[in-house]
Amino acid sequence: MIKSENWNAQLALLTSEHQNSLLFCWKIRTGFRKGIELYRIKAYADWFFETQFLTHLQKEEQLMIRILGKSDPMVVKSLAQHRRLKRLFLKERDLIKQLNSIEEELETNIRFEENKVFKELRRNVNLFSLDLIYYEEELQQNPKEWDDHFWK
């Protein structure tokens, strides 16, 4: 359970994961700029999706729904963006368009959540809702680092 004194730490963890996702976007842009083979960038995107992104979405969605409710317009928008991003990550054709779309839409989603959703979460959180939130620290495992640093 998240206790009131842990709320800021949990939100900070999600923000830190957003920073990692923004770094992921930068790596895709850098790979394109350097003319890296698309299959290498796609392999990295697949690894990121499986080892980091899906877990992040699960935690974030749980938090937003518990505090703001599933029908909140910002939650509805964020969940729709998440569904779109999942479809983009799983798409297997037109790699350059797919990777460009992932990079652009992921950055847009993060900016929206940081500037709108997280501010609203801070305003609406209360001790009752915090006591209802189940947060599995184990979900945030440190996966093996990606070996192909094509962005360097």
Image (tube, rainbow, N blue to C red):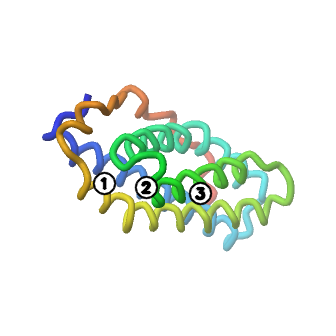
Q: Quadrant of residue 116?
A: bottom left
Q: Which mark is residue 121?
A: 1
Instruction: Spot the residue most to the left.
Output: 5
Q: Horizontal and vertical percent for residue 84?
A: 66, 54
Mark found first going from the N terminus, 2 or 1? 2
Q: Residue at x 26, y 53 (%)?
A: 124
The reply to whether residue 152 is in sight is no
- Give x and y (percent) for residue 146: 57, 43
Q: Judge left or right: residue 151 versus residue 12.
A: right
Quadrant location, the C terminus: bottom right
Query: Do the numbered discs 3 and 1 sit on residues whose CB atoms are within 8 Å?
Result: no
Q: Residue at x 47, y 61 (%)?
A: 110
Callout 3 secondary element: helix
Q: Residue at x 54, y 44 (%)?
A: 53
Please state which amino acid type lies under the numbered disc 2: His
Task: Name the residue type under label 1.
Answer: Leu
Q: Which mark is residue 81?
A: 3
Q: Residues within 10 Å of mark 1 (few under 14, many from 20)?
A: some
The residue sitting at the right extreme is 93
* Residue labelled with disc 2: 18
**Residue nearest the viewer, comparing 106 with 70:** 70
Note whether 73 is above or below 6 in the view shown: below
